[in-house]
């Protein structure tokens, strides 16, 4: 059933895109009349994207603006865009879980958890000592 529906949608889409319309007395394709002109940026240039957490950089075309520059492997100088996560550091692409913490949140959490565990152990040992002293007192009274 779904293959019939997808075939029908494909036929309707193809028919819509290939139909002819009259413009200024001439028959023209719909696609050339509907497409807007000058909507895409024209200021593409080579830019280096750098992921400092993974020590990974790559050169590509982009319209992103930057005041930083870097000398690339080919000897030319290109604008530099710094990124926090790239394919070299993202767990989906690496297959391993990396914690990228630029503000120390994970460290603070781990410190709080360690302090709570230490308090728990301290309270448990204190409770053991009081229980032991109570047991000694009760045995000495008998």
Image (tube, helix red, strand yellow):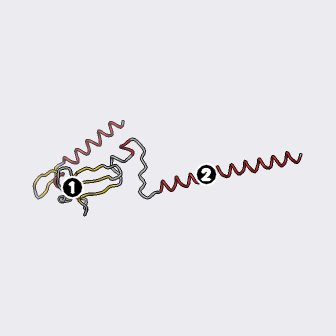
Residue 56 against residue 80 in the figure, above or below: above
Q: Is residue 103 left or right of residue 79?
A: right
From the top left corner, tell me how far across and down residue 132 is, in percent: 77, 47
Residue 63, by quadrant, is bottom left
From the top left corner, tell me how far across and down residue 104 is, in percent: 46, 57
| Image mark for residue 71 | 1
Mark 1 crowdedness (10 Å alpha carbons): few <14, some 14-19, many ≥20? few
Q: Residue furthest bottom?
A: 67
CA gap, disc 2 to disc 1? 50 Å
Which quarter of the rendered picture does the N terminus lie within? top left
Residue 80 against residue 134 in the figure, above or below: below
Q: Residue at x 13, y 57 (%)?
A: 23
From the top left corner, tell me how far across and down residue 53 is, in percent: 36, 51
Q: Residue at x 29, y 53 (%)?
A: 50
Identify the element where label 1 is drawn: strand
Q: Residue at x 15, y 50 (%)?
A: 29
Q: Is residue 29 left or right of residue 84?
A: left
- Name the residue tied to disc 2: 118
Pick the residue in front: 93 or 107: 107
| Image mark for residue 93 | none
Which quarter of the rendered picture does the C terminus lie within? top right
The number of callouts visible is 2
Residue 112, by quadrant, is bottom right
Earlier residue among tags 2 and 1: 1
């Amino acid at each position: 059933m779904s293959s019939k529906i997808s075939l029908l949608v494909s036929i309707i889409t193809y028919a819509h895109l290939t139909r002819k319309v009259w413009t200024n007395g001439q028959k023209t394709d719909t696609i050339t009349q509907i497409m807007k002109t000058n909507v895409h940026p024209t200021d593409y240039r080579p830019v280096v994207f750098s992921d400092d957490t993974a020590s990974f950089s790559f050169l590509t075309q982009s319209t992103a603006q930057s005041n930083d520059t870097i000398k690339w492997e080919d000897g030319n100088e290109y604008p530099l865009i710094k990124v926090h996560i790239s394919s070299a550091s993202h767990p989906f692409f690496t297959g391993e879980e990396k914690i990228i913490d630029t503000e120390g949140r994970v460290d603070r959490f781990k410190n709080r958890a360690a302090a709570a565990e230490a308090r728990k152990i301290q309270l448990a040992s204190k409770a053991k000592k009081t229980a032991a002293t109570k047991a000694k007192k009760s045995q000495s009274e008998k």
